[in-house]
Image: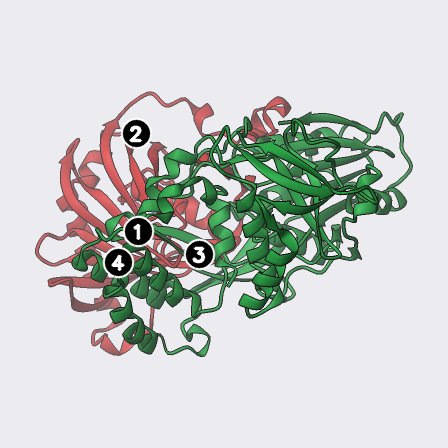
Amino acid sequence: MRHRYFIALFLMAMAALPLLAEASNSVSRKTREETFRAVWETVRDRYYDPTFGGLDWDAVGREMKPKAINAPSDEAFYQVLQEMVDRLGQSHFSVLPPFWVGTRHLSRRGAATAGLELAESNGQVLVWRMREPAAGSKGLRPGCALLEAGGTSLGALREQTLTQTKGKAEGDRLFREAVEALLAGPAGETVAVKYSCGSAAPEAANLPLRYSQRERSESLGFMPSMETEFETKRLPGAILSIRFNLFVMSLLPRIRAAIQQAATDGTRGIVFDIRGNPGGIGAMANGIAGYLVKDQANIGVMKMRGAELKFLAFPQDGAFSGPVAVVVDGNSASTSEILAAGLQEMGRAIVVGERTMGAALPSFIVDLPGGALLQFAAADFVTPKGFRIEGQGVTPDIPVSLTAETLLAGKDAPLEAARDALDRKAPPATAPDNGGFIVTGN
Amino acid sequence: MKTRTFAFLAASAILLLAFSLLSSAQTISPAQSEAKADKILERFLNVTGELEALKSQTSRRDRGTMTLTGLGVSGDVEVLAKAPNKSRMTMKIAGIGEIVEAFDGSTAWVQDPIQGYREKTGLELAATLRQADFFMAANYKKHYPKREWVSAETLDGKKVDKLRLHPTEGAPETWFLAQDSGLLVRMDSVSHLPQGDIESQVYLEDYKMIDGTMEPMRIRVVNPLAPITMELTSSEVNIELDDSLFISPRKKGPEEIIIVQ
């Protein structure tokens, strides 16, 4: 049931698309039938598991077809299709309606948001990073607990999502999405928030909703352009942190350049910070790993119908040979998990942070009749030792979470734990340490 | 047996093999089987005009487009071939970048914007050595020392002869040649990649006469990953191709070793 998270991977801007809320009934019966058949047959023919996990796919088709064809609206029709693929209980299944696809161009500037990145800790929603200055926010800063957004109590919202979902993971996911939606909307408007910072009394503020000025990735096939973040930070002890929010081609040269630079400038260790990174181009995990290995290495196996393909890292010139850590959290998914698990299993990296999402099925996005899209899992994925990431996630070697106290103190506990681990592991510095400042970013 | 077709197949993760055991369908002796296979292959080479054309050709450049069917991914393809055994295929894919696969006569290499640079070894290298032979049409017996006629079958409503060709190294390939036209219409094969073996079926369609030879204007590849279609848009022969086009970046000098976009 993690599929909806991947809609965020494509767009991260649902709240900015008011068309989604408008009911319509323009998809003809013929198109509905063709679309239904395309979805059902794609799963039948190309889903990696020909047993469908024990599900009788024929029976599912017979049950769902009349519901879909006779659905009272277009939205309901596509919802039935989504429910059908949800029966598989796997990540990376999404039916993206044409009205969603058609509004992608509206999101090219990104959603207008309050510019807050959030984390959860001990039942609190914490401000983790502030992507843009929040004018008039009266002391709102990382570590503050968000109490209300848009007039909605986050405590009540959490209760509601937990009671309406089957499990905690699903409830957590829905809650995150709901909070993100509350903090987004039309550009130029504001969203009212209440928050408390440490023991101080709660404060209220109206945060302006703005479009991000960040770079966007190029589109690839039906995968649209998305907002990208890349940052390198020199940490004390000549440890380099490389943070990026997506596995997309536009970031790969910068990631490589940072690694290659580290290989020559006395850097003692590299931390890859992929918290909140939902994945992207799967092969980028191999490509990055190729700059961290001396010999060809296997980081996992993609299992399709009729073929198994290893994710191989081919050693590249300019590779970094020092110790490596990967920082992850519960929102690290897909390619993030493949990279973390692969490096962890081969002993090339220490994984620090929180257990990852457990949604690591290689998928394709194909077009459907009538302009909709279908994302489907075309392969299973296991580590070289056979560990299946899907549904389980990657367990960190060093479990550390963000907390209000550390954030308010200006500390990033998981990142610092990774730095400390590398500092202990790396050989002594051979060059003066000029650590502690941001080198690049966007 | 054009370098273009083979290069595309290789770079598309689809090279050759096939097959299931169909020996029960074979009712003639091995010698008769080989003779029959050779007769069919030579007819194919004569029908396409390849044997005759090779007498006057030393290089070739083909250009076209490629599409990953249904995925919205497409790009441009260029295949270069230079006698006696140099080849280079470049795919420029929107959203990915440029993938180059080449053989300079001694080193077969691949450079892609995601996974970087690597050199081919083992069965993958053996397949490239075979495919890069500019005179493949004349040398097919050397590259496929064992050839069998397997059976006569019906494929997509057309009568075809099914042949099994055994290369010097690697898995055998199965070729289907139309009985009426003599043209190769399908190849079943396995690509031996370091990541694993990939089975595929390659359909060669819409033959047209270009520069004195019959060429498939469309090549469709069906494999477990995603269907791929290549459409040929232009073809030139006897053009100037500098040897540097085929040389591995690692042989060109240290300043060119670092492979980034």
Quadrant into which the C terminus of chain A falls = top right
Q: Position of residue A257 (x, y in %)?
A: 65, 29
Label 2, residues with CA under 10 Å away: few <14, some 14-19, many ≥20: many
**Label 1 to label 3, Cα distance in Å?**
61 Å
- Distance from the alpha carbon under mark 4 to that under mark 3: 45 Å
Query: Which corner quadrant of the image does residue A57 belong to?
Result: bottom left
Where is residue A112? Give x, y as percent.
51, 34
Q: Where is residue A113 in the image (x, y as percent from the top left)?
A: 55, 36
User: Which label sits on residue A35?
Assistant: 4
Q: In the drawing, what numbered circle is on residue B61?
A: 2
For the point 56% across and 46% down, which residue is it? A180
Q: Which of B28 and A250 is in front in this view?
A: A250
Is the Cβ of the residue at disc 1 closer than 8 Å to that at disc 3?
no
**Label 1: which residue?**
A23
Which hue belongs to chain B?
red
| A235 left or right, relative to A227 | right
Q: Mark 2 or mark 3: name the one nearer the start of the chain.
A: 2
What SS does tag 1 mark? loop
How far, Cα to Cα, is label 4 from label 2?
Answer: 41 Å
Asked which secondary structure carries label 2, the reply is: strand
Are both tags, 4 and 3, on one chain?
A: no
Kindly identify the amino acid type of the residue bearing the numbered disc 4: Thr
Q: Name the mark nearer the viewer: 4 or 2.
A: 4
Which chain gets the green colouring? A
Residue beneath disc 3: B169
Q: CA gap, disc 1 to disc 4?
A: 19 Å
